């Protein structure tokens, strides 16, 4: 995986390009977004390949906004975002992107009167899975998130944590090349959280998994690379090892992440 990113000037040492191989799946070039007259972020640039990417930042830093742009649900105000070589601002580009994209939003919407199985089946079919293969795709996804035992339950009866896992199953049923997860472990019990961490790692072996989280220890545990947003841009883009070298001797990666997010470095 390669990570190229711009760092907020004066915060951390410059992180240089690190080429490891593979094809770029996500590219952002001088990306910017604003609400009215307020800039959320500007001049954000990075390149991602396969692996797990931790996207971190305080509330309001722009994590969710960035994910929605990558998910083709919101257009950038400046710069360019490419997924799998397609521009998110192009109508035909968005159509091509969505076939190979999985997305879990902060708020998971389900078809409450339908079964858990049927929710995932619809998501798989909508993303182009052949009808003859939908059943296997659903079973694979539900097994991955630990929901096979409630496959016949109406989705409205799920707990908050189960609903979140259902959202992840819907996002992975078609085996996307790019998977965007916004706070995937929120409301999930500790045992299932570990299971989801293992799932992210497994999917990241072949696909790009971008995980937005406010939990520094979670990012330190699962991420191959980190994007830390702060002050309207990227404060850091690089590997956890690179980041740990910026910390005090003996300070673990999670603590260094927290100091960068808080503006202490």
Image (tube, grey):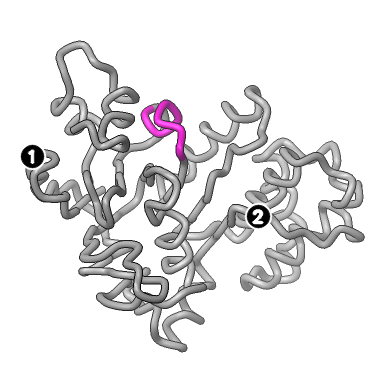
Q: Position of residue 135 (x, y in %)?
A: 77, 58
Q: Residue furthest front?
A: 37
Q: Position of residue 169 (x, y in %)?
A: 67, 50
Q: Quadrant of residue 263?
A: top left
- Residue 207: tell me if it is visible: no
Q: Quadrant of residue 29?
A: bottom left
Mark 2 to mark 1 CA distance (whole Å): 36 Å
**Picture layout, residue 131 above or below residue 259:** below
Which residue is painted at 91% across and 47% down in the image? 153
Q: Quadrant of residue 222?
A: top left
Secondary structure, magenta segment, majority class: helix
- Residue 177: tell me if it is visible: yes
Inspect the magenta stretch and tell me whether residue 217 lies in it: yes
**Picture layout, residue 243 above or below residue 55:** above
In this rendering, would 41 be left or right of 67?
A: left
Residue neighbourhood size for the residue with mark 2, other residues' Cα within 10 Å, grouped as few (<14), some (14–19), many (≥20): few
Query: Can you tell which mark lies on residue 107?
Result: 2
Which residue is painted at 52% across and 33% down in the image? 197
Q: Position of residue 233 (x, y in %)?
A: 25, 56
| Front residue (pair 169, 109) | 109
Dot 2 or dot 1: first in sequence order is 1
Inspect the magenta stretch and tell me whether residue 72 lies in it: no
Range covered by the magenta-colored residues: 214-220
Instruction: Name the residue that disc number 1 marks.
Output: 13
């Amino acid at each position: 995986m390669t990570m190229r990113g711009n760092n907020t000037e004066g915060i951390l040492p410059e992180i240089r390009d690190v080429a490891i191989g593979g094809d770029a799946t996500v590219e952002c070039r001088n990306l910017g977004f604003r609400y009215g007259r307020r800039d959320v972020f500007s001049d954000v640039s990075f390149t991602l390949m396969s692996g797990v990417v931790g996207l971190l930042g305080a509330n309001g830093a722009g994590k969710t906004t960035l994910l929605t742009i990558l998910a083709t649900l919101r257009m950038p105000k400046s710069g360019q975002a490419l997924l799998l070589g397609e521009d998110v601002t192009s109508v035909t580009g968005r159509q091509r992107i969505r076939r190979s994209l999985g997305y879990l939003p902060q708020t998971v919407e389900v078809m409450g009167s339908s079964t858990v199985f049927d929710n995932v089946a619809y998501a798989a079919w909508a993303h182009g899975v052949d009808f003859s293969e939908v059943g296997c795709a659903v079973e694979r996804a539900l097994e991955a998130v630990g929901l096979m035992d409630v496959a016949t339950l109406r989705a409205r009866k799920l707990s908050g944590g189960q609903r979140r896992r259902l959202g992840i199953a819907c996002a992975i049923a078609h085996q996307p090349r790019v998977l965007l997860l916004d706070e995937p472990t929120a409301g999930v019990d500790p045992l299932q959280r570990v299971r989801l961490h293992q799932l992210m790692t497994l999917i990241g072996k072949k696909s790009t998994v971008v995980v937005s989280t406010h939990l520094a220890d979670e990012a330190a545990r699962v991420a191959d690379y980190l994007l830390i947003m702060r002050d309207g841009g990227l404060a850091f883009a690089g590997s956890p090892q690179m980041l740990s070298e910026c910390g005090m001797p003996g300070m673990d990666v999670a603590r260094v992440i927290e100091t960068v997010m808080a503006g202490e470095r």
